[in-house]
């Protein structure tokens, strides 16, 4: 699977669609490798978002 952020191939990518104060269910899907996912979560926390759901791997 390929990360949409860093473009690296890896065994797993993740996407948060719905969490507290965060709903991207209608947005274009963006899948991230674990490293980019963690960086995005830290960025959201710094911006004031809190309480994300447990990520679900996309195992296509």
Image (cartoon, rainbow, N blue to C red):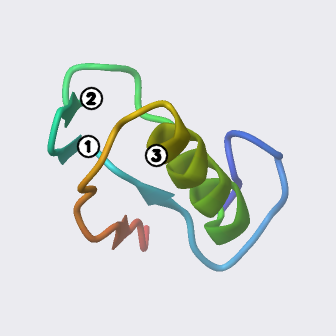
x 41%, y 66%: residue: 58
Please report whichever mark, 3 or 1, sits nearer to the chain's N-terminal start. Answer: 1
Question: Left or right of 10: which side holds 53?
Answer: left
Quarter of the picture holding the C terminus: bottom left
Please report whichever mark, 2 or 1, sits nearer to the chain's N-terminal start. Answer: 1
Whole-percent x, y for residue 56 in the image: 31, 69
Q: Secondary structure at mark 3?
A: helix
Q: Secondary structure at mark 2?
A: loop
Q: CA distance from mark 2 to mark 3?
A: 16 Å
Classify mark 2: residues with Cα within 10 Å, few (<14), some (14-19) or many (20+): few
Classify mark 3: residues with Cα within 10 Å, few (<14), some (14-19) or many (20+): few
Discs 3/1, front = 3
Is 44 located above or below residue 41 in the figure?
above
Asked if disc 3 and disc 1 are in contact, CB closer than 8 Å, the reply is no
Q: Would residue 32 be visible to someone looking at this image?
A: no
Discs 2/3, front = 3
Q: CA distance from mark 2 to mark 1?
A: 5 Å
Please report whichever mark, 2 or 3, sits nearer to the chain's N-terminal start. Answer: 2
Tell me the number on the disc at residue 45.
3
Question: Left or right of 54: which side holds 59?
Answer: right
Q: Secondary structure at mark 1?
A: loop
Is 50 located above or below residue 23 in the figure?
below
Question: Left or right of 58: which side holds 26?
Answer: left
Q: Read off the residue under disc 1.
A: 17
Classify mark 1: residues with Cα within 10 Å, few (<14), some (14-19) or many (20+): some
Q: Read off the residue under disc 2.
A: 24
Asked if disc 2 and disc 1 are in contact, CB closer than 8 Å, the reply is yes
């Amino acid at each position: 699977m390929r990360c949409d952020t860093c473009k690296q191939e890896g065994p797993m990518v993740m996407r948060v669609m719905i969490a507290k104060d965060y709903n991207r269910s209608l947005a274009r899907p963006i899948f991230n490798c674990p490293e980019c996912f963690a960086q995005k979560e830290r960025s959201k926390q710094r911006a004031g978002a809190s309480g994300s759901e447990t990520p679900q791997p996309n195992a296509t």
